[in-house]
Image: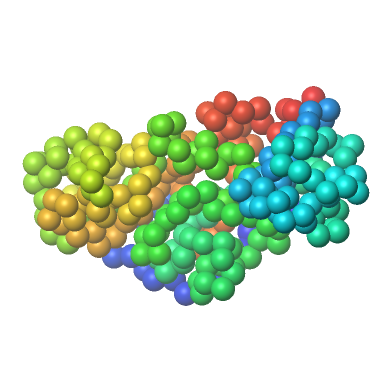
């Protein structure tokens, strides 16, 4: 059984109001066992196999096929090949097993950690977590921001969570460099033009003279910071507290945990997927 671990890099304490402080807990939820998920009798395209097993993206898998580095039952794979659990798939001569256990983690990211899987980037999130298996973050959270980020080895759910047209909620607590008025909240709520395009309307509410809560249904690059900048303000602290049904409540800064059974079931149901353990029945 895996055990939650502390981040290995120094933490920079945010200067936030009381509204920003996540509820603490003396213990972190124990990871639940995830059953293996061979895809039963189903077949899938070779590039999808690689994302299902958390090995790489479909685009990278296509590149590996085109370079002649993938074999299926001893023959060179071609783009569009269908594979199933009875097939022996190898990359550079190394057999890729079917049925890796799906992993769904949440991490309370401190300020200073970079959301990247690139191992040569100092302070990258993967090294900070130290998880023994291959995982990757779902989306990004700026280096100078803190809060909730999800990680997985399930490449199938990434786009379902991130693509703006799906409208999945992400909730943030924000602190500005100076007090704001109601006109600021109204303009933010209606949407602000950044990078040549207006953002979607959002739900926003005041928490203090310089603090507010906002719920977005899209995730453009540095969106909240750019929105505030366009209106003449500067973000001095940004903390994500929720992604869909998953919250950071009770998870100490720099700690990670597996999603609980309930969190995972609700997340996958919202993504219109069947929970992995139910596929086995």
Left or right of 151? Residue 199 is left
Q: Position of residue 279 (x, y in %)?
A: 75, 28
Q: Position of residue 71 (x, y in %)?
A: 83, 49
* Quarter residue 33 falls in: top right
Tell which of 27 and 93 is nearer to you: 93
Q: Position of residue 256 (x, y in %)?
A: 57, 56
Q: Quadrant of the C terminus?
A: top right
Tell which of 133 and 148 is nearer to you: 133
Residue drawn at x 80%, y 37% is 83
Left or right of 51? Residue 188 is left
Q: How is the image coloured?
A: rainbow
Q: Quadrant of the N terminus?
A: bottom right
Left or right of 79? Residue 202 is left
Compared with 210, 187 (above or below) is above
Query: Is residue 211 visible to the viewer in this orientation of the structure?
Result: no
Query: Is residue 77 visible to the viewer in this orientation of the structure?
Result: yes
State how many labels appear: 0
Residue drawn at x 59%, y 32% is 268
Compared with 123, 188 (above or below) is above
Tell which of 57 and 190 is nearer to you: 57
Compared with 96, 143 (above or below) is below
Q: Position of residue 22 (x, y in %)?
A: 40, 52
Residue drawn at x 80%, y 46% is 77
Residue drawn at x 74%, y 33% is 44
Left or right of 271? Residue 42 is right
């Amino acid at each position: 059984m895996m055990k939650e671990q502390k981040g290995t890099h120094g933490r920079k304490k945010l200067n936030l109001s009381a509204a920003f402080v996540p509820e603490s807990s003396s213990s972190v939820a124990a990871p639940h066992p995830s059953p293996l998920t061979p895809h039963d009798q189903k077949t899938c395209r070779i590039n999808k196999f690689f994302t299902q097993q958390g090995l790489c993206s479909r685009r990278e898998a296509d590149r590996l096929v085109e370079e002649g580095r993938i074999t299926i039952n001893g023959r060179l794979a071609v783009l569009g090949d269908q594979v199933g659990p009875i097939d022996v798939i190898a990359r550079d001569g190394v057999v890729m097993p079917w049925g890796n256990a799906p992993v769904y983690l949440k991490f309370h990211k401190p300020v200073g950690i970079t959301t990247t899987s690139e191992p040569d980037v100092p302070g990258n999130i993967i090294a900070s977590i130290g998880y023994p298996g291959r995982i990757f973050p779902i989306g990004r959270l700026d280096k100078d921001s803190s809060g909730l980020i999800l990680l997985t080895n399930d490449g199938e759910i990434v786009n379902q969570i991130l693509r703006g047209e799906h409208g999945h909620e992400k909730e943030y607590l924000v602190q500005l460099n100076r007090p704001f008025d109601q006109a600021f909240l109204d303009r933010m709520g209606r949407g602000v033009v950044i990078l040549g395009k207006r953002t979607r309307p959002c739900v926003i509410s005041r928490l203090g003279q310089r603090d507010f809560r906002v719920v977005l249904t899209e995730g453009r690059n540095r969106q909240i910071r750019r929105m505030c900048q366009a209106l003449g303000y500067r973000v001095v602290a940004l903390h994500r507290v929720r992604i869909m049904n998953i919250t950071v409540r009770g998870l100490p800064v720099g700690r990670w945990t597996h999603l609980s059974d309930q969190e995972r079931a609700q997340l996958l149901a919202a993504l219109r997927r069947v929970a992995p353990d139910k596929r086995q029945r």
